[in-house]
Image (tube, helix red, strand yellow):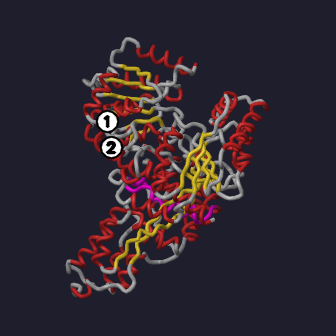
Amino acid sequence: MPVPKVQRKKMASNPFHFVGCWELREMLGRSARDEEQLMEAIEEVSLDSIYYHTQSFFLRHKYIAGPYPNDFATWAAIQVRDRVLGEKLGVLDPYDFENLESLRSEIVSIIEEHLSQLTFVPRVTYGEPFYFMQSRIIAVPTGLQARTLTEFREILATVDISAIYYHIFEARLRLGKRQDDFSRWVEEQLNLPDLAAKIAKLDFYMTSLETIRHRLIKLCDEVLEGKNSK
Amino acid sequence: MSRLEDYREIAPKGTIDFLLNLAKNVEGKKILHINSTRLGGGVAEILRSLIPLMQDVGLEARWEVISGNEEFFATTKAFHNALQGQEQRFTSTMLRTYQEVNKENAQRLSLVADYVIIHDPQPAPLIEYRPSEGKWIWRCHIDISRPQWKIWRFLRQYVMKYDGVIFSLPKFSQRLPIPQFLIYPSIDPLSEKNRELSAQEQDQILRRLHIPLDKPILLQVSRFDRFKDPLGVIRAYRLLKKHHDVTLVLAGGGATDDPEGETVLAEVREAARDDPDIHILLLPPDANLEINALQRAATIVLQKSLREGFGLTVAEAMWKGKPVIGGFTGGITVQLVYGVTGFTVNCAEGAAFRMHYLLDNPEIMAKMGEDAREFVRRNFLITRHLGDYLALFNFLNKI
């Protein structure tokens, strides 16, 4: 059923404040040359480091996707040339996990199981070691705010791409919210639960930030043009 | 001098407003950069562009240069080489000179600022004279992944007194009890070396350099240095020449005052002998427009280094929409995403194969050039560099 016109024009009592971010990259001075060292370090590094290597990837690869959406998988496949471990780690979706700690635990389990089936520890021969990093995300208010779906859609189309990252990825895992900021606001402030559900169901992990932006805009347009149910 | 607004149409959409917002929390803060030269070299080139931009976003940024005698600079040159892994000998007199000259500079310069950025080893001991206020960061531009340990241990005593360090690549990081940040260097798209050139300007420059335009041009811009592998480039060109009629241009400088450079140049000349399609150009250090014109005229740009700090000539060529084939080393691997923004190779045969592939597939070459330019726009422009510094100041402001 199409959304009634009055609802499409609903004015939110609390506007959506768009916040962008800048990633300051910090090196931990720790590296791994083989998969066992990688596993041990993953067990010990900060959660900010797990976050860096599995999430903020999107901030660094805006146009060009690497072979896998996390650095551990890419390193195993490309630098160690262990494509099996690369594929096993590459399929992980961080959003299937309650928090970063459980994600860490799963990564360690995968590597441990993989190593248990081998008679040697795969290591870097020609490639580069794995260098552990961590993210320092600096939130930056853009000064842009939306009160209606139309305004929301217009700002989405032009806002710095880091705002898409901040409200989806940063909000969902690092800030401990189980929902992205966009779908929550659309549901709570614009009373558009169907649109909120569709936003929340978008598969964010296997794509780029620009693609996510386009998909969000398309979903908003469907409602604004009266093509969609609420 | 370029202003921040001049970059609005060049930087990614929304960047300038974003930088202005990022600067709000640190507006009015005093920033002091200190290095050892105002002219020549990558650090001075970056600071010349960066300082006015920092001022434009509301920071009180200034740039000071330490002075020193011949002995001091001979010592710091040896430091530089030792930190990059060459075996060097140091006497206690050399180390004393290093400390004394820094002490004299500390007395001469005003070191008061909210954030002080000390570039490279030359002024590192200034940390001993830091005022009680302000955060101090050591910015290391060189490759210290395999340093001569004795000299790193000596320098480390100073580095540990800083509030943080900045390196250009993760592999340069060290075991240190202070935060280590990763900030890539950058190019200025509006500088003489990178600005747009009119066809007429470009033609004039190339005519002056006697570069023929009748065949595809392969170009390597670098010092005549074994680490840049110019002989490997000639070998790759010869392998390619069996399939494509091309011109090779090797453009560089710095050979006259460098005994090894002269030897390498002589070897290159010998290898190129009798081949009218190989052009060897010795350029002065300020030949920015010439490099710009050569890079724009090139069909494929090579940076076939065997060892490299960051290798910003790669980003310069990528910014001009050129496909680049680079050695699998240092910062080249960060700039060239294999098969997307360029190719990294490990030997002359690899370079020849990739040149052949690109010349046979001009549409791939064009797409690669486009992707390369966009990759630089996002990652290696001076505006991104400014953003990293602003993020760092924001972060330090909170701890």
Residue type beneath disc 2: Met
Res B358 label: 1
Q: Quadrant of the N terminus of chain B?
A: top left
Magenta residues, as a range?
A45-67
Whole-number angstrom distance, CA of label 1 to CA of label 2 = 9 Å
User: Is there CB contact under 8 Å for labels 1 and 2?
Assistant: yes
Residue drawn at x 38%, y 72% as measured from the top left? A144
Residue B243 percent coordinates (x, y): 29, 25
Q: In this view, does B36 lie above or below B283?
A: below
Residue drawn at x 48%, y 38% as measured from the top left? B311
Left or right? Give the position of B102 relative to B264: right
Residue A113 percent coordinates (x, y): 57, 61
Circle 2 sits on which residue?
Answer: B368
Could one spot residue A88 in this view of the protein? no
Pick the front one: A97 or A48:
A48
Residue A205 percent coordinates (x, y): 41, 65
Q: In this view, does A169 lie above or below A6?
A: above
How packed is label 1: few (under 14 Cα within 10 Å), some, or many (20 or more)? some
Subunit that carries the residue with mark 1: B
Q: Dot 1: what SS?
A: helix
User: Dividing the picture into quarters, in which one does residue B298 lie?
Assistant: top left
Residue drawn at x 52%, y 39% as measured from the top left? B44
Left or right? Give the position of B138 relative to B276: right
Pick the front one: B317 or B304:
B317
Residue B2 percent coordinates (x, y): 40, 46
Q: Is A37 a magenta residue?
A: no
Pick the front one: B351 or B229:
B229
The disc, 1 or 2, on the residue closer to the chain's N-terminal end is 1
User: Dividing the picture into quarters, in which one does residue B393 lie?
Assistant: bottom right
